[in-house]
Image: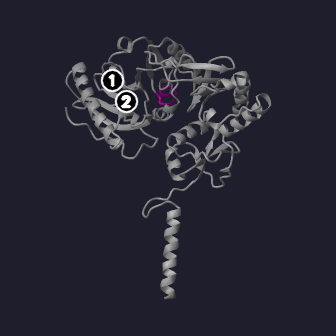
Amino acid sequence: FFFLRFCTLTLNAFFVAMAEAEVSYGAPIKRAGAILVDKQAAKTAKSLLESAKLLDKSRRAANVENKLAFPVSDVDAALALLQGMPCEVFEEHLMQSTARRPQEQLVAEINALLATRAPGTVLAASDVPCKWERHGDLVLFSEELFPDAKFDAVRDQLLHVVAVCLKCTRIATKTRISTDEFRTPQTHLVYGEGTIVRHVDNGVIYEFDIMKNMFAAGNIREKLRVSKLNCKGETIVDLYAGIGYFTLQYLVHTGAALLYACEWNPAAVMMLERNLAINHVADRCIVRPGDNALGAPHGVADRVNLGLIPSCERGWPVAVRALRADRGGWLHVHDNVTSASNATPHDAWVERGNEIARTLKCLLQETHGGEWTATVTHIEPVKSYAPHIMHVVFDVLCRPSPDPTLTPAAPTHHLPSAPGTEAPAPAPG
C-alpha cells in the first residue's frame, strides 16, 4: 500500500511539474536565458530576434564589457537564428523582469513635468507609442505624438522630455507610405532640425532624407542573406535600387565585379550616389536613372535583384532581358504572397513559386530563344506585410537547355529559413 501510494504521489508531482512548465511529452523544452552579442552587431541581432519573436521584452538588455546581453525566450532558437554572427549564451543573465521599459520611463517623466506645468493633466500609457525606429540621433514614431488638444500648451516641452529620455536630438512622425509612383514617405519633423539621417546595417552606411526617401527597416534579414551570397566576379543588375538597400550589400560584401543600379526616383538616385561614395564602392557601380524598362542593360547579368513589393511582376521581362543569353543566371524575385486563414503559408508560397517559374520560363524562351529552365531553388520569408500576407523572396535559377558548361555559383544561405521553405522544382511548362 505504501509503495503504491508513493508511486502515485511521484507520478502526480511529475505531471504537475510538466503542466507548470507548459510542455508536452515528446516536445522540446524551450530554454530561456540571454544571448551575448558584440555591440557592432547588436542592432542587427536585436532586429532579427524581434522579427522572430524571440526577444523577451519583459527584461532589459544588459551591458557586459563591450557586448550586449539580450534576454530571449528560447536560447537554442536564438543561437540558430544568429548563426554566423559573433554571439554566445550568457548564463549570468542579470536582466531584471521588473526593469522599467522605455515607454514606461517616458510616461513617468512626462507626468512629472505635467504635474508642475499642467496640474490635473495626466498622460496615459496609451498616449505614448510603444515602438519607434532610431536612425542615428533621430527617433521616428509611426504615429502622431500628443495629438490631444489638452497638450497644446506644453507640447514642445513634452517633446523635449521625449528627446532627453530617448537620448536623441531630433524627433519625427510618419504615417502610411504614399501611393504615388515613388512610394514617398509621409513624414513630419516635430523636434530638432535637419532631415538627413545616417543608418548602419551590417557594416553598410545608409544616408537618406526621411522626408523624401523610404527606408524599410524590416528588410534586415534579407539584407543579411544577400550579403552572404557568393557573387565573386559577377555582373549584377538591381532593378529597384532605391537609396542602395540591396545594391550596397552586394557591392560591399559579396565580391561582385560590377553592378547596374536602376532607379527612377530622382530623390532616391541622389542619395544612392551619395551612399556609393560613402561606402567607397562607386567605382564598381553604374547608376541608370529613369524607367528600368528603358535603362536596364541587356544580356549582361549573372544575377538580377527585383526588390519591389507588393509585386515586381512588371519588371520580370526587364530582368529576363538583362540575363546573359549564353548561360542565364539568378533572379531574386520579391513578392507579397497571400495565404488563406485556414491554410499553411508554406503551401501558398510553393504554389506561387511554381507560378513564377512557369511564367519566367516562357519569358526566357520568348526573349532568348531555344529551351530554358526556371527553377525555384529557395524560398525566403522576409517579414509579415499584413495578416495572412508575407513578403517572400524566390531564388530562381534560369538556364538554357542543354545546360552550358559554365553556370553561375548557387547562392549560399547562412541565415536559417523557416522549416521546410525549400521549394520543389516547378512543374514543366
Look at the image and say whether residue 231 sits in the magenta stretch: no
Query: Which residue is identified by label 2?
Result: 335
Q: Position of residue 13 (x, y in %)?
A: 53, 72
Q: Residue 376 versus residue 382: which sits nearer the camera?
A: 382
On the picture, is 268 further left or further right than 421?
A: right
On the picture, is 361 further left or further right than 298?
A: left
Q: Are marks 1 and 2 in contact (CB under 8 Å)?
A: yes
Query: Which residue is identified by label 1?
Result: 313
Residue at point 70%, 34% (across, down):
122
Q: Secondary structure at mark 2?
A: strand
On the picture, is 17 further left or further right than 113?
A: left
Q: From which residue to which does the magenta span run?
A: 249-255
Residue at point 66%, 42% (across, down):
101
Q: Position of residue 298 (x, y in %)?
A: 33, 16
User: Above or below — where is 182 with respect to 383?
Assistant: above
What's the amino acid at mark 2? Asp
